[in-house]
Image (cartoon, rainbow, N blue to C red):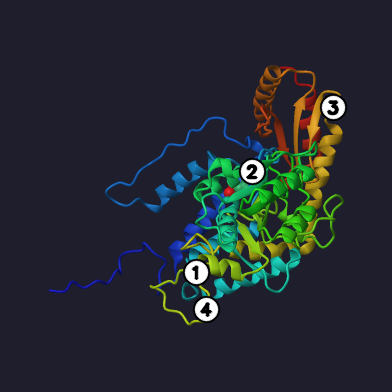
Amino acid sequence: MTEKITNDDINYFPSINGNNEELLDLLRKTSELLCKWYSDTNKRSPLPLNNEFKVTYPLKNGSDVNNLLSEIEKLIYTSFCPSHPGSLAHLDPPPLTISIIGDLIASGLNNNLLAEELSPSISKLENDICKWLSKKIGFNEDSGGIAASGGTLNNLNALVTAKYSSGLTFNNEAVIITSEDAHVSIKKCAKILGVEDKNIYIVHTDKNGCMHIPSFIKLLNSLIDSGRKIFAVVATFGTTIRGALDPINEIGNICKEKKIWFHIDASIGGVFLLANNKFDNINNFNVCNANSITINPQKLIGIAKTSSLLLVSDFNTLKNTFQTGLPYIDSPDDVINRGELGVQGSRPAEIIKLWLGLRFLGMQGIEKILKESLLKKSIFIEKLDENKFEIYSGPLHIVSFLPKRMNAEESNNWTLKAKKLLIEKNYMISRPFYKGQYYLRVVFGNFNTTTLHISELTNLINNFNA
Ligand SMILES: Cc1ncc(COP(=O)(O)O)c(C=O)c1O
């Protein structure tokens, strides 16, 4: 006998014929919790000092929504708070209000960027926003791009495309060149691509943390002269420790002349290329000779994680590299399913929050965030005692520093203790390991940090004796 399924008494999912009062009530209650957490921010530390969160597990019967609300509350109150004005450790700014809404809409719609028939309007949105951004940074009509969940994955998308487009996918001896200050994700991508360490050629950086061009040229020529195949040169536009900018114009010219794929990891600095009014020390850079560029709006302009794009000067390179056919998707020949433009298959609609964020901020809002982050960094450097500290900072909003007149052991000890003191005073900064020792690093991507906070922070640092 066939059982009759009505589901009348079950509300696991949004109702398709009722008025969704329960969902509305739940959205209101969770929003209230989240908003209270934001409003309470100044009463807490950016990072809870004790992690009291206890994990609970599924039971035989499903849990009541109100029980879950109290668990959500515990989770919220034991979380890192990027909105705290003292949150200055990493490239994790507060989320823009509209980007929170973007994520809500994305999960509510639950469309899939794998295929156009699973996300008709959002596929178009992603395609067109990527194209708009590509042109904005200086690529031409042939350009385009794809979103992926983070900079690492987009560097991977770029390097897979580079290797394929150079005809070197199956060449185990193919070489990649980057600088000693490139992000570790480049090494990770090389591993995934089966590139052995000996085939990763590292160019040293100059005193400003930028790829040293004479050394790059020397290395490149010697590799070419000895018959080595190079599948990519990777420059960094915004290094992780000191916000330095590799000389992308020179590197781009050389790569173009030698016909080598040029990828720019602009995960950090890419958003600065969007500004209409360029900034001192940044305005002379251009990407016109790059083949691909990673940009992470999640790192500075407050698009909630993850928000990262790979933009390519020739959109066809993505299609040629990743197209496999999608046998379970029936689509017209002229449709490009976006699951065939990168390594990810099913993908959430992360583009919604980026699109809303860009619309909400406008060019003025974007420029305000960028300008203020640079200004805050300058104020910090101005107030940091130059007699006591060695300061390392490129044109972007990141500063690393070390105490002067200490040997490595004393300095490591000082940075450890200083970081601990600062978090007790509600300032969270980071302690990266760079060139053989620990530095302290401050990232000025937090809109809520004011000059008063910077004064307090520099006072604490200037007067700290371990
Ligand atoms: C220069 C640079 N590239 C790539 C990445 C990796 O980005 P994600 O953490 O989004 O994978 C980072 C992360 O900080 C970075 O600083």
* Alpha carbons under labels 1 and 3: distance apart: 55 Å
Q: Which residue is mark 4?
A: 335
Of tags 4 and 1, the one toward the viewer is 1
The mark nearer the N terminus, 3 or 4, is 4
Q: Nearer the viewer, residue 284 or 419?
A: 284
Q: Position of residue 114 (x, y in %)?
A: 48, 67
Q: Which residue is mark 2?
A: 201
The mark nearer the N terminus, 4 or 2, is 2
Of tags 3 and 4, the one toward the viewer is 4
Whether residue 312 is situated above or below residue 63 in the rendered picture: below
Determine which of the numbered discs, if any, sits on residue 385 in the image: 3
Whether residue 269 is situated above or below residue 108 in the rendered picture: above
Q: Residues within 10 Å of mark 4 (few under 14, many from 20)?
A: few
Asked if ligand 1 lies within 8 A of label 3, the reply is no
Whether residue 166 is situated above or below residue 177 in the rendered picture: below
* Alpha carbons under labels 4 and 2: distance apart: 39 Å
Under mark 1, the amino acid is: Gln
Under mark 3, the amino acid is: Asp
